[in-house]
Image (spheres, grey):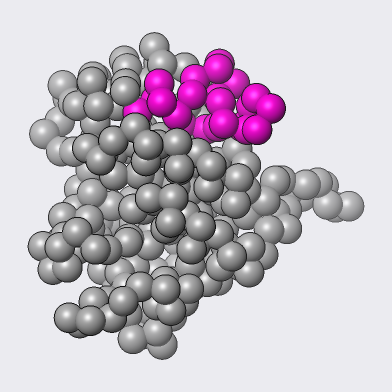
Amino acid sequence: IFEVYERFEAALEEARAAIKGCLKACQIPVGVSFTFDSGKDKTATMMGVTPEQAYKLALDCGACFVGANCGVGIESYITVAKRFAQCGKELPIWIKGNAGLPEIADDGSTVYKGSPELFERAVKPLLDAGARFIGGCCGSTPDHILAIAQTLKNELPREGGQKIFFSPSANTAELERRVKEALGDNYTVVVGDIAEVPVIEEMRNKALRLDASFLPLGD
């Protein structure tokens, strides 16, 4: 079980207060994720926070990981992941991009047109950039998470019984601990946001079709 403060975070002061509050209130790991959707190359938050500043804050405040989520499509976070990785190896990097940007359909509903294939193409660059958690945020579906997992199955070495791990819950830090115990340092975790991917049985069935391990952690 863990706590991640991630929703649309943009300012260092707010993130610092949130991390400290979570750490004071509980004894579980706490991580922080920012939305990088501003600046010339979309590598700053709306308040001007850079990946380097976010990493330093997370490390100084005792967070267990740092990352980026929401705001842009998953492919836009490849550069952000690279910059996080250049900051050091102390904190795992968490990346959860949207399925594109939201659009308003003719009936007034909000739709995301980023396809599962878009997620599939982003996996290897994110791995190469240093991402340790790869998942989907707004607009993602079980098919988007399946695309990530299928690509990981092809990209990751399978020696020693290495497996792909699914979790539709947000309890990713516990998942990471269990994966690290089983696989050592050479692993990647596939995560789905429980708010956007609530169909646990569907995720379980897709994991079975991939010969993957499905870990339903938490509620």
Quarter of the figure with residue 154:
bottom left
Residue at the image point whose x is 29% and y is 26% from the top: 58
**Magenta highlight on residue 75:** no
Q: Quadrant of residue 41?
A: top right
Residue 63 location (% of width, % of height):
24, 31
Residue extent of the magenta highlight = 34-55
Q: Is residue 106 above or below residue 178?
A: above
The quarter of the picture where residue 16 lies is top left
The picture places residue 132, in percent across and down from the top left corner, at 34, 53
Q: Residue furthest front?
A: 86
Residue 47 magenta-drawn?
Answer: yes
Quadrant where the C terminus sits is bottom left
Main SS, magenta residues: loop
Q: Is residue 147 left or right of residue 107?
A: left
* Rendered residue at 23%/77% (across/down): 162
Q: Position of residue 27 (x, y in %)?
A: 11, 34
* Residue at (17, 81) in percent of width and height: 160
Give me the residue at 73% from left, 53% from top: 111
Report whether residue 193 is seen. no
